[in-house]
Each structure stands twice: as C-alpha cells, then as structure tokens.
Image (cartoon, helix red, strand yellow):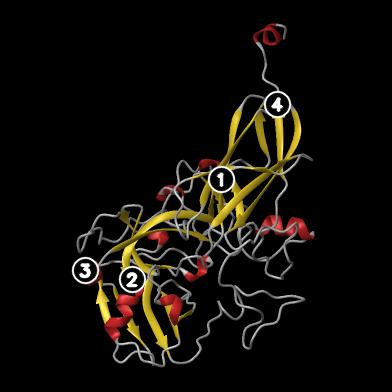
Amino acid sequence: MGRRYMAGERAAVPAAPPADRKVVKPTPPELMEDTGTGVDFGTRPDRIPGFLVPNDRFYIRSHAPTPRVDAASWALRIEGSGVRRPVSFNYAELCERFPLVSVIRTIECAGNRRVLLGEEHGRTFEGTPWGRGAIGTAEWTGVRLRDLLESAGVTSGAREVMPESLDDVRFRRPLPLAKATSDDTVVALAMNGEPLPADHGFPARVVVTGWLGAASVKWLSRIEVSEQRLYSPWNTEDYVLIGSGFSGEEPARGPVITTVPVAVLVELPWPARLRAVPQMIRGRAFAGENAIATVEYRLDDGPWQLARLEGPEVPGAWVRWQFAWTPQPGEHTLRVRAIDDHGDTQPAASAYNELGYLQHSVLAHPLRVEDVPTPEREAGR
C-alpha cells in the first residue's frame, strides 16, 4: 500500500514557520478552521475531496507547539519494568530493521463537536472549542508496535504500555498491553505516502485503531512498558468523563475515555446555503472500533430514509454515505444518524460531562435553500 522509505529520507529539520506560529504547515481558512488556541486546527467538512484527507488539510490537535525534530539525532527508547532489557532505535533502524505495514485508519479527537455539545446543554466548556472538524482518515505506514516491544522482551507480568511525546509537555497516555500489541497498532513513519509531516508527529507517532485521538501519541521519544498501572494527567485529570452519573477509579476523576462512539459528519458548512437544484448530499460515518452498518437521514419532519453507503469499507475507518435531493427554497433541517454493526446508534441527546467530550447525538443541521434566478427574473431587475 505505502512505498518503503529509505533511511534518512526527509531527515532534515523541517523549515521553521514564522516566529509567532506554533504549527508548521499553512492553515488557510478555505481549508482549515482556526479554534483560536494556536495549535489546534480543524478540517473544513466541505473541503474533503476523497476518502483520505490530504495532509495539507488533516486536522491538527496538539498540547504544545510542534517540535522541530532532527531525525539524524533522534532515537526511540523502550524501557520499564515490563521489559527484560531496554532498547533504543534510531530512525534508520525503524525504517530498515522491521517489516513495514500500512493501515487506513480514522483518528478523532474526543472533544470533537464540543461547541455543539455546549449548545445542547446551554453552556460553554473549557478546552479546545471544536466544531465538527477534529476527525480525519489517512493511510499510515510504519512498523507494528508489537514488533518493537518484542525486541525488548516483554515480561509475562507486563500490563500497560505508555508512549511519550517529546513535545514541551511530554504528553503521554497508557494503553493496555492487549491494545498496544494488536496487529493494527502501529508506530507510523509515513502518512498518505509521504514521511510524517511535522505537525502530525514526525519522525514517528503511534496510531491506535478506534480509540480517541489522544491515544495516538505524536513525536515519540520513549515507550514505557510496566507491570503496574500507569498514570498521567491525560488519563486522570483530562480525557475522562466527569459529572453526575460518572464514577472513576482513583486517581482518575472519572471513567477514562478509550473508544469513540458512533457519529456522522455532513460535508456541508454549518449553517449551509444551497441552491434549489438537484444535488447530492454527502458525508462520513465513524464508529470507532466497530463498523458502520446503516446511515439514515431525515429532512424536516419527514420520515427516516436510508442513505447509500459508498466504499471502501475499511475496519477502523469512516465510511462515506450520500443521498440525492432536490430541495425547495426556504429553511430546512437535515438530521443524519448512523447505526453500527453492534446495533448502537446515535441518541437524541448527548450525556453531559464537565469537560465536554463525546458529543454524538443526532444533530439538527440548518440548511437555507435559495431559489435559482431565471434569465427572465434577472432581466427584470
């Protein structure tokens, strides 16, 4: 699927952006949505041209400015009580020593649609004010994390694996050993056929199927394997569900978020302005570790109808859907819901939690349809 990358390819330090920029790639408003944090930019839902999101418009979610990494001096360490011996790999060794694999996977931030969850509950949440653009699908090429761990000799008592970033906050978050050693948990070196862009984890990042984006740690520097439970601020204070009805295990403030629920994306601006002409309404549906079985849509107070699913159908990735519509002028509301292969569907309302995570209820997408001027009407103006 992805081509093999030679050792040292793209090993130079990425070109520095302007001094006041915290990310490297351009984020033009015609492609990206600026959340105002300086490090978080969403993908415009109406600017996704194919099944995969191109690198130039894939959303950016970071906890600190993008670090500049020189692959020639970079190394990845694997250590901890859960391995028999610590090991270290440089960039060339990762590229050449281990079998390369490619997986197509969707990554979604747990805070996606936080602004819309706030509108549901009549409040504003702290955290990145995401609209609908903190989700994307790419082809990731790299090596299985399992292969790297096996080279260190995983002990029989190993329990958790915690990748750590070399960004300014040393972002880190543990995975159960079973998830870390899954066939499709990879240390990615390339994205959509190109070496990882700086903002997306160069030189190496983890890609974890079906889990919240925070599990796919970027800019890897070290991986701890432990025979004990592991904790960080990002599985105790953040990326947990806090509020009435949620109870967590100490020291976490609430249940730790792992998988993401079923939800849909409509490939239209919010609100959308359409012309009163025949057209196709399109979108994406994603169900985390599960597969999408059905997508339904409802226009205004009409009945629920089946949308057509479009290939490819790839485990751990979104599916595309579409339906034909000839709209009449006026104000309309579009609702879309997905059902996964376990029978889970989107609720009428999302559960409240203090940090504004996991909005996945059916959204009422506002549409304004405008009449198409005729030559006669234009001439009469």
Q: CA distance from mark 4 to mark 1?
A: 21 Å
Give the residue type that dot 3 points to: Ala
- Please tell me how crowded label 4 is: few (under 14), some (14-19), or many (20+) other residues with Cα within 10 Å: some
Would residue 159 be seen by someone viewing this image from the given angle?
Answer: yes
Disc with the residue nearer the chain's start (3 vs 4): 3
Disc with the residue nearer the chain's start (1 vs 3): 1
Disc with the residue nearer the chain's start (4 vs 1): 1
Where is mark 1, residue-wise?
A: 45
Residue 256 image point, x, y percent: 60, 77
Residue 149 image point, x, y percent: 33, 81
Residue 27 image point, x, y percent: 48, 48
Disc with the residue nearer the chain's start (3 vs 2): 3
Say which element carries label 3.
helix
Q: CA distance from mark 2 to mark 1?
A: 31 Å
Residue 137 image point, x, y percent: 46, 54
Where is mark 4, residue-wise?
A: 370
Where is mark 3, residue-wise?
A: 92
Disc with the residue nearer the chain's start (4 vs 2): 2
Q: Is residue 175 above or below residue 28?
A: below
Give the residue type that dot 2 points to: Arg
Give the residue type that dot 1 points to: Pro
Q: Check the picture and name the quadrant holding the C terminus.
A: top right
- Residue drawn at point x = 71 percent, y = 10 percent: 377
